[in-house]
Image (tube, rainbow, N blue to C red):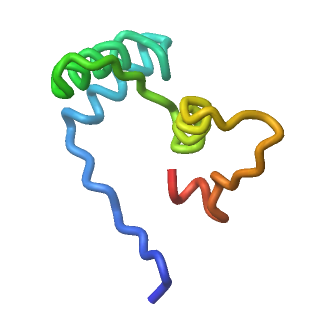
Amino acid sequence: MSFLPFTRPDIDEATIADVAEVLRSGWLTTGPKAKEFEAQLSAYCGGRPVRVCNSGTVTMEFALRLAGIGRCSWTSTRPPATSTST
């Protein structure tokens, strides 16, 4: 058995239809579905502003900037297998 086993995803027809709708819209990251998700997440969080990101790495970069950690500061935000972790 491998250290990090992968399993076959369970994707239903509704999910496939939603993905097809996004692909046909021409927007992959910042389109209407992303804005809709941000609005729903904001409502869930009590109206606080939220932004969605396309990866965990971008999220970590935002967090570092919000914490005042900028260029010329040594940090490590990328684990050895970023594609698996994000």
Please, is residue 36 above or below residue 71 in the view? above
Please, is residue 49 above or below residue 79 in the view? above
The residue lying at 72 percent from left, 34 percent from top is: 70
The residue lying at 42 percent from left, 15 percent from top is: 24
Residue 61 location (% of width, % of height):
61, 37
The residue lying at 16 percent from left, 22 percent from top is: 46
**Residue at the right extreme of this rendering:** 72
Residue 36: quadrant of the picture: top left
Residue closer to the observer: 48 or 28: 48
Q: Quadrant of the N terminus?
A: bottom left
Residue 16 location (% of width, % of height):
29, 34
**Residue at the bottom extreme of this rendering:** 1
Q: Is residue 52 left or right of residue 21?
A: right
Please, is residue 55 above or below residue 42 in the view? below
Circle count: 0
Residue 23: quadrant of the picture: top left
Q: Is residue 47 left or right of residue 31?
A: left
Residue 80 location (% of width, % of height):
66, 65
Residue closer to the observer: 5 or 37: 37
Residue closer to the observer: 67 or 50: 67
Q: Is residue 78 left or right of residue 22?
A: right
Residue 56 location (% of width, % of height):
52, 44
Please, is residue 51 above or below residue 7 in the view? above
Residue 62: quadrant of the picture: top right
The residue lying at 16 percent from left, 26 percent from top is: 44
